[in-house]
Image (cartoon, rainbow, N blue to C red):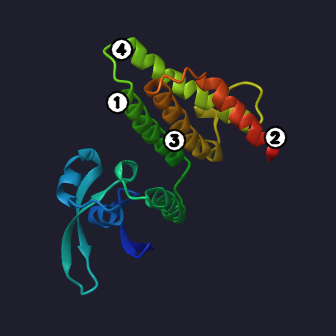
Amino acid sequence: MKTEIWNGHNIRFIEVNSEWWAVARDVTEALGYSNHNDTIKKLNKNGVAISDLIDNMGRTQIVNVINEINIYNLVFKSRKPEAEAFKQWIFEVIKELRHNNGLEGFQVFRMLDKEHQKEAMKRLYEALRSEDKEAVKYNSIKANSITNKAISIMYGFDKSIKKEEMTPDMLQDRQKLLDEVTNLMIMNEKYKLNLSISKTIYDSILNQVKTA
C-alpha cells in the first residue's frame, strides 16, 4: 500500500494485478461526494473491488478500491472546484507509481482523453437534445473535428492530425479545448447566435499563437 496526500486528504493506493487502485472512500471524500455508497454503486463494476487493508493500528479493514478509469469518472462528475487539480495530481501520482513498477504510463493519456470526450459529448447531447439521431451524431463529429483541427493549428501543423497521433501535451490541451468547443456550440444553439463555431475557434487559436 502507498499513501499520498492531496489537499489534506490521505489517498491510499493498493496494487491490484500490477495496477494501482485507490481506496474508493478516500477519493469520494476528496472530491466532495456526500453519499459514498450511492456514488460507488454508479461506477463500472469491473473497476470496483474489495480489498484487505491494514490501518495505522495494525487492524485489518475491508475496503472498496477503484481502478484508474473509475477514479477519472469520479473526477469528471465532481462539482468540486478543485476537481481539475485533483485530476492532474492523481495522474502524476499513478504515473510515478507505475514508473516505479517499471510499467508503461502512456496509455493513461489515451484513457483519460476517451473518458473526457465521453463526458463532453454527453453534455452536448443533453443540451442539444433532439430526436434526430443523425443530427446528434453530426454535432458530436463536428465538435471533435473542430477540436482536432484547432489543436493542430495550436501546435503548428498545416493539416489536422488525428487524436491517435497526438502527444500527451496535445491531448491535455485537447481536453480543455473540447470543453470550449462544446460550450460554444451549446450557447450558439441556446441563444441563436448564428456563429461559425469553427471560424470562431480557429481565429481565437491563431490570435493566441501570434501573441505567444
For label 2, count other residues whose C-alpha is less than 10 Å away and answer few (under 14), some (14-19) or many (20+).
Answer: few
Q: Residue furthest bottom?
A: 57
Task: State the residue position of label 3.
Answer: 110
Give the alpha-carbon distance from disc 4 to disc 2, as whole Å.
Answer: 39 Å
Residue 7 at x, y = what percent?
A: 44, 72
Judged by depth in the image, the label closer to the viewer, 2 or 3, is 2
* Dot 1 amino acid type: Glu
Q: Earlier in the sequence, mark 1 or mark 2?
A: 1
* Dot 4 amino acid type: Lys
Task: State the residue position of label 1.
Answer: 126
* Dot 2 amino acid type: Lys
**Secondary structure of the residue carrying numbered label 4:** helix
Judged by depth in the image, the label closer to the viewer, 4 or 3, is 4
Horizontal side of 18 relative to 203 (left or right) equals left
Number of numbered markers: 4
For label 3, count other residues whose C-alpha is less than 10 Å away and answer few (under 14), some (14-19) or many (20+).
Answer: some
* Dot 3 amino acid type: Arg
Q: Are marks 1 and 3 in contact (CB under 8 Å)?
A: no
Q: Give above or below for 146 relative to 39.
A: above
Q: Earlier in the sequence, mark 1 or mark 4?
A: 1
Task: State the residue position of label 4.
Answer: 133
Foreground of the two, 78 or 89:
78
Judged by depth in the image, the label closer to the viewer, 1 or 4, is 1
Give the alpha-carbon distance from disc 1 to disc 4, as whole Å.
Answer: 13 Å
Residue at position x 44%, y 36% from top? 120
Task: State the residue position of label 2.
Answer: 210
